[in-house]
Amino acid sequence: MRKPFVTFLLVIGFAAVTMAQQGNSPAAGYWTGEVMRNGKTWRVAANISEGKNEVKATVDFLDLDVVELPFTTVRSGAKLQLERPQPSGNPIIFDGTISGDDYIGTWKGFGVEGTFSLKRSEAKPKLYREEEVTFANGAIKLSGTVLVPNGDGKSPAVVLVHGSSPNERTTYRTWARHFAENGIAALIYDKRGSGRSTGNTRAASMEDLAGDALAGVRMLKLRRGIDAGKVGIAGHSQGGWIAPLAAARSGGVAFVIVSGAAAVTPAEQSIYHRADVMREAGIPDAEIAEATRLREKIYLFNRKLMASDRDLNEFKAALSRELADRKGSRWFAPAELPPEMPNDAPPRGALELLFFDASHVWPKVKVPVLAIWGDRDTVVPVEKSRTLIEAYLKRAGNGDVTVRMIPGVDHGNNIVPAGDEWDFPRRTAEYDSVMVNWIKSRFG
């Protein structure tokens, strides 16, 4: 679930560069403080360890709710630089000096510059333990981590399922940590075809992905320290289709949480999203309509593929010509249309996922449901999805339904800045508190 968080911070990797330690002030420790720019602050923390020939560092971006991101390090005397590459090409850099219990210097990131000031602090005790796990859905082997609250009692638990990207477990680590710190065990895992999990993400149907989540539920139920009757599933974005599907297929799911969920097909959601992106880019409605028509035509072709219609070559050739004729249009790039139809057909699972119909799923969900959206979400049709999900659950006779709309928040749970003035990216803490309190109110 998480969160399609801000993707520029979710580059996977870890490296430590050899340092020449000449200063007297040790770098090792837990450091807390702020990055500052134009009167605005951004809370950060760094966990730094020192060996004989190396320094290792991870950084927590507390206002973004992204933690334990590894940074490369270079130390020379009292100088210490932390750096993390970004997809944009502009790395995040802390370049400063350690003097006693102060680490102060300049900061760069997202194409802007500022300063930072950190102080050596006492790290908070860890309220949970981590256990590496493997589990299987048929031939697919899945690898993950369970975060279990400290103590000898049995706790509720939640399986965190993925959004549409081929995410590894780190994507949802912060959500898992919030659950575990509040007495709720959490499973995060590498999506099939990612990290140490086998399989092919692109070829997976929604049913395949729901099966992976249910395999996680079954594994948790057998673990010591987990209350087997209180294991649920939480999903963000694409996970908003997967979580209810898993609950509809199995009586072993105790609750469902969806965040940024769409109640329409992924194909319709895609059309909605691209139209909104074009609208934000200033594309006129008539041109948006033309782009939408082409996208719908591509989806019609894919439906015909699913139905094994014959003689599609002429249809495909004509559609390729239309795409080629319009690829020079100003709306073509923001529409994210292909320049021509690909030669290879999408895998069957990908086609099934594209046209997955949640209207057959939600009416079968009988367990408690929490549905959350940000009111600035432009990726899914929020009001339509909310209305449909509430209607489906009413049809199911499910009276334990909680709906929350978080103001000023987008699809990635990020706070949308007011006005045009640049601000540090920030994530709302309300999502976490709403989910934790909701589970506690029902399952202790």
Image (cartoon, grey):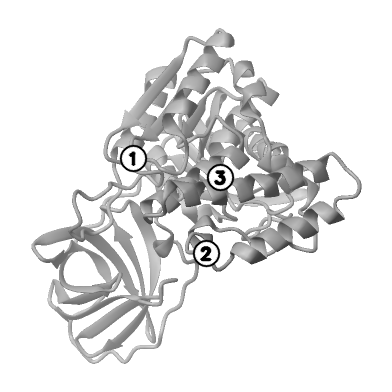
- Which residue lies under the disc numbered 3? 270
Q: Nearer the viewer, residue 156 or 317?
A: 317
How far apart are the alpha carbons under marks 2 and 3? 20 Å
From what the image shows, is residue 362 above or below residue 182?
Answer: above
Q: Quadrant of the C terminus?
A: top left
| Circle 2 crowding by C-alpha within 10 Å: few under 14, some 14–19, many from 20 | few
Residue 132 in sight in this render: no
| Circle 1 crowding by C-alpha within 10 Å: few under 14, some 14–19, many from 20 | some
Residue drawn where x is 67% and y is 52% of the image: 192
Residue drawn where x is 48% and y is 17% of the image: 390
Q: Callout 2: helix, strand or loop?
A: loop
- Which residue lies under the disc numbered 1? 376
Q: Nearer the viewer, mark 2 or mark 1?
A: 2
How far apart are the alpha carbons under marks 2 and 1? 29 Å
Find residue 329 and name its label.
2
Residue 376 in sight in this render: yes
Corner quadrant of residue 149:
top left
Name the amino acid, label 2: Ser
Q: Position of residue 275 (x, y in %)?
A: 48, 47
Name the amino acid, label 1: Arg
Corner quadrant of residue 363:
top right
Q: Position of residue 97 (x, y in %)?
A: 17, 82
Q: Callout 1: helix, strand or loop?
A: loop
Q: Nearer the viewer, residue 365 or 305?
A: 305
Indicate which disc, 2 or 1, sits on the residue closer to the N terminus: 2
